[in-house]
């Protein structure tokens, strides 16, 4: 499904969760988020993974990228020269809970610069 990055909310996560259980006959939905402005990315988890944030029309959205460090996607996200660049992100939207606070988090699989993948 394609949507504006500002629609990546806890309400959408609840709607996606209603589609569970995911498995071979019912794959987890992959989303294309348009209009995300890269704020920052940093390395985490022993050096293979990254986390960061994008600005959307709905506010800030955290993202993680597993095994992206050292790939073209990871290199782009980690390059400070790309801060404030509008990107389109492909991946999964999930709930993150930290210290009792729940928030939306995007699991990045791929990106494109600009509005399209």
Image: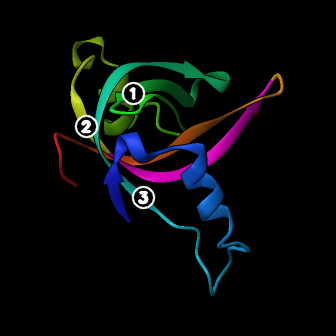
Residue for point 70% across, 72% down: 20
Residue furthest bottom in the image: 25
Spatial distance from mark 3 to mark 1, Cα to Cα? Answer: 15 Å
Q: Name the foreground residue: 34 vs 9.
A: 9
Q: Is residue 95 magenta?
A: yes
Q: Position of residue 16 (x, y in %)?
A: 60, 63
Q: Which residues are magenta?
A: 89-98
Sequence-wise first label, 1 or 2: 1
Look at the image and tell me in which quarter the N terminus lies: bottom left
Q: Residues within 10 Å of mark 2 (few under 14, many from 20)?
A: many
Q: Are marks 3 and 1 in contact (CB under 8 Å)?
A: no
**Which residue was labeled with disc 3?**
31
Q: Residues within 10 Å of mark 3 (few under 14, many from 20)?
A: many
Q: Is residue 114 left or right of residue 1?
A: left
Residue for point 47% across, 37% down: 68
Label 1: state its secondary structure.
Answer: strand
Spatial distance from mark 1 to mark 2, Cα to Cα? Answer: 9 Å
Q: Residues within 10 Å of mark 1 (few under 14, many from 20)?
A: many
7 lies above or below 24: above
Q: Is residue 116 left or right of residue 109?
A: left
Q: Is residue 51 magenta?
A: no
Label 2: state its secondary structure.
Answer: strand
**Which residue was labeled with disc 1?**
54
Look at the image and tell me in which quarter the C terminus lies: bottom left
Q: Name the foreground residue: 5 vs 79.
A: 5
Residue furthest right in the image: 100
**Which residue was labeled with disc 2?**
87
Sequence-wise first label, 2 or 3: 3
Asked where in the image residue 55 lies, by quadrant, the reply is top left
């Amino acid at each position: 499904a394609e949507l504006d990055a500002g629609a990546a909310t806890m309400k959408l996560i609840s709607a996606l969760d209603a589609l569970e259980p995911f498995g071979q006959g019912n794959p987890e939905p992959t989303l294309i988020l348009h209009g995300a402005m890269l704020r920052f990315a940093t390395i985490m988890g022993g050096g293979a993974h990254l986390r960061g944030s994008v600005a959307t029309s709905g506010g800030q959205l955290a993202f993680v990228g597993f095994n992206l460090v050292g790939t073209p996607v990871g290199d782009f996200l980690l390059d400070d020269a790309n801060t404030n660049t509008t990107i389109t992100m492909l991946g999964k939207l999930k709930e993150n809970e930290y210290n009792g606070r729940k928030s939306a988090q995007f699991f990045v699989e791929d990106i494109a610069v600009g509005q399209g993948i």
